[in-house]
Image: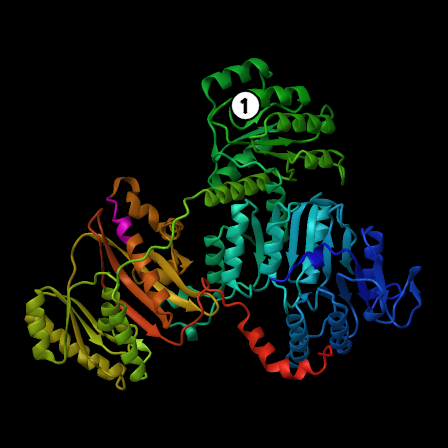
Amino acid sequence: MKSLKYIFEPKSVAVIGASAFTGTVGNAIFSNILQSNFNGPVYPVNPKYDSIMSVKAYADVVSIPYSVDLAVICVPKNAVEGVMIDCAEKGIKGIVLITAGFKEIGEAGKAIEDKITVIAEKYDIALLGPNCLGIVNTHKDICLNANFAIKMPHSGCVAVISQSGAIGVAALDYAHQHNLGISKFVSIGNKAVVDESDVLEYLIDDDATKIITMYAEDIGNPGRFFEMANKANAKQKPIIIIKTGRSVRGAIATQSHTGALSSSDTAYDSLFAQCGVIRVETLAQLFEYAKGFTCMVQPRGNRIVVLTNGGGMGIIATDAAERCGLEMTNFAPETLKELKAKLPASANIHNPVDIIGDADAKRLNDALTIIVKDKNVDAVIVSITPTVETDMNAIAADLCGFARANPGLPILGNLMSLEPDPAFERLLEKANIPNFDFPEADIRVLTAMIKYYEWINQPQIATAKFEVNKNQVREILDALKKEKRTRLTEPETYQILGAYGTKAVDFRTAKNLEKTIIAAGEIGYPVVLKIISPDILHKLDVGGVKINLKNEDELKNAFAEMSESIKSKMPDAKIHGFLIQKFFTAKGIEIIAGADSIKGFGSLIMFGLGGTFVELFKDVAFRLAPLTRQDALNMMKETKGYQILKGFRGQASYDIDAIVDYLLRLSQLVTDFPEIKELDLNPIRVLEDSQGLVIMDAKAIIAEPVVSFGKHSAKVEKSETVTKLQPEIDGRILPK
């Protein structure tokens, strides 16, 4: 990684394209740097001026007689390449390229962007942008505001990464309105060289940053992002992200149940779930959650207390807590006894605790002092509405003192005000007490905090590896490629699954009726009869499945009906023969599992309850291969069906360990053979505890391998561009 210290911690800055005209980008950037009290020299570069804002100007960056760490470039697009060459000659190692009009406008712009990327790569320049807003570092030793749209935000512990400049402006404005201090802001734009993972790597080691927020339209290298997110978790720096582009592939591309339910956005959800990243839908949620984590206290559990001076607020909070799965704690008898003795007779001493509308700071503190001694309390939400008798500043000050005296208890505020910018907000911020406008926000935020800390505290288990027969799978897949076939037959799919240690129901294959009857006799009635054809993916739709055939006569009739139906509905289908299976009658529950490859991510593993209605109910969950045992369990727990598997309301429980084992073997298979594009196993019959599972039906499709998210695929396109353009650029850059 190129050092981003030249971007975020420069000792000197040149603004190339600085202007004396108010309203221009060059003027706004230069003005913002000066007004932010940057702790270093700033050099305006523009051949049209002798000075700008009373600062000596230079015709070009090479003419500056001093060293320059960072160049902020805001010249017209066609001048950028020449300016980049000047920066390389000057030895500048950090560039923020504000100028737009590159790959975001099409191929012509991309061609220019490719050239400046080559320059940056060749001369080891950390290039941010192009088409970006700029950067901000609020640290007192730097004080750099190198952007053209926003004034210096107040200092804090929240970093903001935005792929969109406009969203970045909106985000910082929202943070300012809600008294959220910023450590760093960076607009990454087109990500020609520096991308979100590079910025994450810098922020993970930045002591001023405790929480990282992001707006992203795509993530260029999911594997590296995964690695950086896990490094952030190791330092307990939560990453909160808005990822736009929730789209589902059209039905034309659907090949199986798994394919129908997965998408690139599903892959992003899986990526975030596997590396502890918190995904939100709105800017409001982004900063709600960020503000919540500023309390810097890890909840011990999900048992909460709501303390309020208004009964209605307590009820709203209680309803929200139930929706979010938080537990309104029941106080110990001694807690109730003390509250009753200390509070007015009209107060409600049960959770939510209502200290009534005339409560002052002392009554609040008395109640909190009693509540905090109860071992059943993991977090407290204080909801206070302004009344004639309520001094909100005094209550806030007292609450801050209480928080300092009880550093191990998360305290979230819902102190309301009729004023637009109440003084107590800053008091609460300095004491690391997040304060929200409504109690529902406190509940949402606390829920996210609890889930995050549960995630980072879960056991870290390595990916499982089983003894398997890879050669058998390779032979089957190579044979398909020679036949120029992409769809495996059901028996072939069973064979590759068997090579990885998974069990299918007992089956035989046959070419004609006579051999079908023999196979059925060997298996034993009742049986299932299926057509074998690489051209028929959904056999039920064309009459290609007959079940519970109890004797030879039923088998003969089914054979004749199936043959006629296939001939009528798919006359051109290649028929490889017939599959005869044991009709499986053991008690169990049906699940579905599968895999679907997504470009840039590798294979998504799916789990859910099975059957024909899986696409209707969509009670499924996904994770990216390779899976750990914890990934497999977490995926199962996301589904409503997990409660059934555990044994719902006294019903039998099923072999969850066998499902986990199966998902891990499936993950290993598609990781070892990334050309397996789709694998759809529906249904799988899971038997009761310790009895295992049996695959009843299987489909598979192969294609060209896609890169797994677990392998660093960083910027293949860029490296190809560098190789292609290098001879053209070399003759025009610095003399050798």
Identify residue for label 1.
371
Q: Compare residues 137 and 730 and report the one nearer the observer.
A: 730
Residue occupying image coordinates x 37% and y 55%: 463
Q: Compare residues 651 and 704 and report the one nearer the observer.
A: 704
The reply, left or right, for residue 387 in relation to residue 406 is right
Where residue 27 sits: x, y (%)? 85, 63
Q: Quadrant of the C terminus?
A: bottom right
Where residue 612 sits: x, y (%)? 31, 63
Label 1 crowding class (10 Å Cα cut-off): few <14, some 14-19, many 20+?
many
Q: Compare residues 380 and 407 and report the one nearer the observer.
A: 407
Q: Magenta stretch containing residue 399, yes or no?
A: no
Q: Secondary structure at mark 1?
A: helix
Spot the residue most to the bottom: 572
The amino acid type, in three-letter code, at marker 1 is Ile
Q: Quadrant of the N terminus?
A: bottom right
Spot the residue most to the front: 736
The reply, left or right, for residue 503 in relation to residue 357 is left
Where residue 654 sits: x, y (%)? 25, 48
Would residue 90 be visible to someone looking at this image? Answer: yes
Residue occupying image coordinates x 85% and y 58%: 31
Range shown magenta: 652-659
